[in-house]
Image: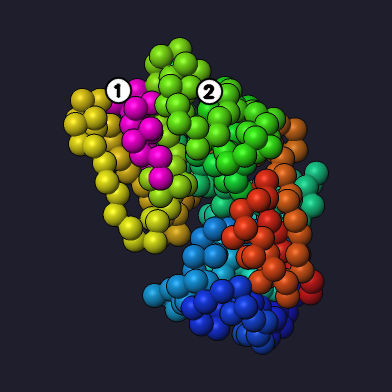
Amino acid sequence: MQLPARQTAIIIEEAGGPEVLKPADMAVPMPAEGQVVIRVGAAGVNRHDVHQRAAGRHSDGLAIPGLEVCGTVVALGEGVARPAIGERVMALVQGGGYGQYVAAHSALTLPAPEAFSDVEAAAIPEALFTTWWNFFGLMTLEKDQFALIHGGTSGVGHLALQAMSALGYKVIATAGSERKVEAAEGFGALAAFSYSADDLAERVMTATGGRGISALLDMSAGTHIEQDLEMMAPDGWIAHLSGGGGAGLQVPLRTIMTKRIKLTGSLLRPLSIERKAIVAAGLTKDVLPLLGTRVRPAIAAVFDLGEAGEAHRMMEAGAHVGKIMLRVEQ
């Protein structure tokens, strides 16, 4: 298939609110060595996209947001053995997902489950790559330990709960309302609590039989750090997914020292292709067989590509459960 020269994509015109997301006529990307080009059927909306939009362009110059897609491979770069042209894939991308075509590294493409629509499959990559990297790349969670996810009904959290509980891990979740607490339990949380509870640490310690949390995934920029440290097991890990807009983190050092707590965190986008490829291999082996049976995304809403601003407004309101998605028409 010959690629078209131009496409419609959503660009960030300038730093600002959802109104700065505008459709634009853009060049279709050409695949570099090791890359494929995907004709996009759907793209996921993530909190990272909202932060990128609010800040404007990233230092790498990419003006098109979007970190995960599902679609059909239409071109191969040099050295690509798989996937093949015509294969339907879901992929983690370095931006550019809010468009009709996007380039992706071949090592970060996964076969799209036949049982999933493009919208469902596009909801998978960012959440599962984030989950696997943080719990098993940064942290060292074992099955006889307890994990906790702040935000168990978020795009990342609800898929992490399903996948990890299906694999036999004991995961506790927090959420922001009783409706979301019930939803987190439905996604496989061993127990779920409101993160605003004054006795959160006590409840978590009770749920773990006094053992505490060995691996905690925090999307709240350390909002609950004192309670987190109280509920941690000795030698436990806390991994942060949000930088809080650059705000500092105040921590009680004596508690960290007493329990030997390790504070870490990472951004998935700057992670090397080599490390992401290791994550992709782990997901392919352990999680892909669960898709459609034990693991399925909850789709909160689907917007057309030109309604990306409305999708961002919904994300910022924070009332949704699961994933917000964009449908991409060709």
Q: Amino acid at mark 1?
A: Pro
Q: Relative to 288, does residue 43 appear above or below in the rendering?
A: below
Is 225 covered by the magenta stretch? yes
Checking the image for residue 170, the label placed there is 2
User: Residue 196: horizontal and vertical position, in percent?
Assistant: 50, 37
Between 169 and 175, the residue placed more toward the observer is 175
* Residue furthest front in the image: 198
172 to the left or right of 222: right
User: Residue 298: horizontal and vertical position, in percent?
Assistant: 72, 44
For the record, the magenta segment spans: 223-239
- Separation of residues labelled 1 and 2 (CA atoms): 17 Å
Residue at coordinates 79% horizontally, 71% vertically from top-left?
329
At label 2, counting other C-alpha atoms closer than 10 Å, the crowd grade (few under 14, some 14-19, many 20 or more) is: many
Residue pointed to by mark 1: 234
Query: How many numbered tags mark residues here?
Result: 2
Q: Are marks 1 and 2 in contact (CB under 8 Å)?
A: no
Q: Taking the image as drawn, is residue 154 in sight?
A: yes
| Secondary structure category for the residue under label 2 | strand
Is 4 covered by the magenta stretch? no
Between 191 and 171, the residue placed more toward the observer is 191
